[in-house]
Structure formats: C-alpha cells, structure tokens
Image (tube, rainbow, N blue to C red):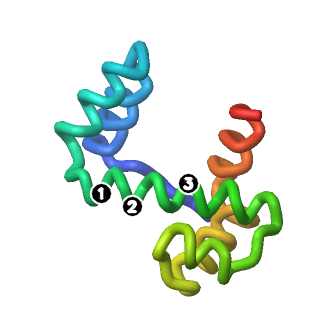
C-alpha cells in the first residue's frame, strides 16, 4: 500500500511527533478532534489490540460497539497495512 501524505498532512504528522508529553498530546488532540472522534480512534486501537490477541469479532463488537465490517477493516490493516498497528502494539508491551 503506497500512501503519500500531502504537505498539510506532513505538517500535521510533524506537529503530532513534536508533542512532548501526555498532557500536550491530550490538549492538541482535544483541540483537533471532537470527543466522538477521539472515542472512535480509541475504539479502533482497542479493536486492533484485541485482534492481535485473536479475540473473536463478536466480543470486540460487544466491547467497542463497532460493526463487524469496521473490525474486519482493522484486521486487514493490522495484517497488511503499513505496519503501524503491529509497531505500536509491540512497543507498548
């Protein structure tokens, strides 16, 4: 999968990578995103971690409220995306 970020996207990525601690990250993300968007990102992250532990879709659906279609998409990215999910799952172990 080839993804080439635009100039604006690169600036956003730089801004995120420049955050120095959890407080700064929270402040920036809360200004950038709605509470619902943050919750959605958190649910995707939770689903990715659960999928990496081979937890069944039904349990993930129940715990996150996500559809099986969204969970399948996360599974696809977990297995064949750009490697971000596996990198961070390994890093937080």
Q: Is residue 20 above or below residue 52?
A: above
How far apart are labels 3 and 2 at the CA level?
Answer: 9 Å
Mark 3 or 2, nearer chain start:
2
How far apart are labels 1 and 3 at the CA level?
Answer: 12 Å
Q: Looking at the picture, how far across and down is residue 32, in whole percent?
A: 21, 42
In the picture of the structure, the residue carrying the numbered disc 3 is 45
Q: Looking at the picture, how far across and down is residue 71, in whole percent?
A: 59, 76
Q: Looking at the picture, how far across and down is residue 13, in whole percent?
A: 39, 35
Q: Residue sitting at 25 percent across and 28 percent down?
A: 27
In the picture of the structure, the residue carrying the numbered disc 2 is 40
Mark 1 lies on a secondary structure that is helix
Q: Residue sitting at 48 percent across and 76 percent down?
A: 66
Q: Is residue 37 above or below residue 28?
A: below
Mark 2 and 1 residues: CB-CB less than 8 Å, in contact?
yes
Q: Looking at the picture, how far across and down is residue 51, in whole percent?
A: 73, 65
Q: Residue sitting at 63 percent across and 79 percent down?
A: 72
In the picture of the structure, the residue carrying the numbered disc 1 is 37
Q: Quadrant of residue 21?
A: top left
């Amino acid at each position: 999968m080839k993804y080439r970020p635009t100039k604006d996207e690169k600036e956003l990525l730089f801004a995120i990578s420049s955050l120095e601690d959890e407080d700064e990250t929270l402040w920036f993300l809360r200004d950038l995103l709605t509470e619902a968007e943050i919750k959605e990102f958190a649910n995707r992250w939770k689903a990715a971690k659960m999928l990496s532990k081979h937890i069944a879709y039904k349990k993930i659906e129940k715990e996150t409220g996500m559809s099986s279609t969204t969970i399948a998409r996360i599974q696809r990215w977990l297995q064949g995306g750009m490697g971000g999910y596996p990198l961070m799952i390994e890093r937080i172990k």
